[in-house]
Amino acid sequence: MTADPRGALANLMTAFERHLEASASKRGEEDPTVIAAYDDLADAFAEYDDSLLQAYGEMTPLDIYDGDEDDDEDDDDEDDDDGELDDHGDEDGDGSVYSGLDDADYEDDDDES
């Protein structure tokens, strides 16, 4: 695979557009068009992230949600309220997908006054 972040970004943007169109016209919860657009979007994102890493040594702050959930494990995780991350990468067990910087990871340069 050639590291072409611009081409991969163009493919990612196209995949986002297709996912939006499929979502807007979906026919039921298991619409195969939406599922295919979802999978294509995940693949395009992975390709972009990989090409960005190869070309510049950088990655996006996002992860692809794989959808694997085990309800038994979720119940166990809700009892653990000691600040540790659960299987979804969050502390509160709400299944949120964002995996960017937390406030503790962000250094505010405004404190230099």
Image (cartoon, rainbow, N blue to C red):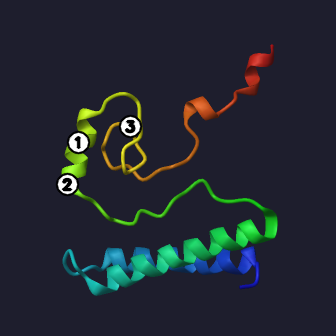
Please, what is the three-letter code of the amino acid marked with disc 1?
Answer: Asp
Q: Residues within 10 Å of mark 2 (few under 14, many from 20)?
A: few
> What numbered label is drawn on residue 76?
1
Answer with mark 3 or mark 2, whichever residue precedes in sequence.
2
In this rendering, would 113 be left or right of 19? right
Q: Which part of the image, by quadrant, shows the N terminus?
A: bottom right
Identify the residue at horizontal 56%, vertical 71% (top origin): 45
Q: Secondary structure at mark 1?
A: helix
In the rendered image, the vertical position of residue 37 relative to residue 102, given as above or below: below
Q: Position of residue 4 (x, y in %)?
A: 76, 79
Are circles 1 and 3 on residues that touch, CB within 8 Å? no
Outermost residue toward the top in this view: 113
What residue is shown with label 3? 91
Identify the residue at horizontal 80%, vertical 70% (top origin): 55
Q: Secondary structure at mark 3?
A: loop
In the rendered image, the vertical position of residue 65 relative to residue 24, given as above or below: above
Identify the residue at horizontal 52%, vertical 78% (top origin): 43
What residue is shown with label 2? 71
Distance Cα–Cα, label 1 vs label 2? 9 Å
Q: Which part of the image, by quadrant, shows the C terminus?
A: top right
Picture quadrant of residue 105: top right
Number of labels in the image equals: 3
Answer with mark 1 or mark 3, whichever residue precedes in sequence.
1
Please, what is the three-letter code of the amino acid marked with disc 3?
Answer: Glu
Distance Cα–Cα, label 3 vs label 2? 16 Å
